[in-house]
Amino acid sequence: MNNWNRANLLVLLFILLLSFSSKGISTTDSLITFINKSPNDTNKVNALNQLAQVLMHEDYKLSFSHAFKALNLSKELSFDKGMGNSYHILGNLYDFNDADSSLYYLNKAKAIKQKLKDYKGLASTYIGIGT
């Protein structure tokens, strides 16, 4: 593909992205639709955690709700990675309001991430603990 075609393709993709965003399609809406249609599996846990992360600064209470739903489903499925991510999100949500709860959840996340050898996630959890 020559440079002219690449440039046109990039412009076309940019225009498509703008048209989608102008129609109100958001990450939040897409995740909610996915969650509502999904069976109780690891993909639903991941979507719940992602939605909790997205809502963290927009709707604090709703973010908690989705993180706890993800945690409970992760426990049902014995999905360690999902549990670790849920604990991490909960630790971050408690960060400014309840330091003890924040450390409790972040330490739970740390233990799971160490077990899974998720070093990137572990580093992020250490940052949360340090904060």
Image: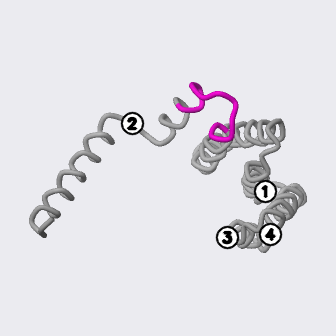
Evaluate if marks 1 and 4 touch, with contact meaning CB atoms under 8 Å apart: yes
Which numbered disc flags the more N-terminal residue, 1 or 3?
A: 1
Residue 91 shows which numbered tag?
Answer: 1
Residue on which disc 2 sits: 25
| Magenta span contains residue 35 | yes
Q: Main secondary structure of the magenta part?
A: helix
Which numbered disc flags the more N-terminal residue, 1 or 4?
A: 1
Evaluate if marks 4 and 3 touch, with contact meaning CB atoms under 8 Å apart: no
Closer to us: 59 or 118: 118
x and y, in percent, of residue 94 in the image: 78, 54
Residue pictured at 59% horizontal, 31% vertical: 35
Residue type beneath disc 4: Ile
Which colour scheme appears in the figure? one colour
What element does badge 1 sit on? Answer: helix
Residue pictured at 18% horizontal, 56% vertical: 9
State how far apart marks 4 and 3 are (Cα): 14 Å
x and y, in percent, of residue 48 in the image: 65, 40
Which numbered disc flags the more N-terminal residue, 2 or 4?
A: 2
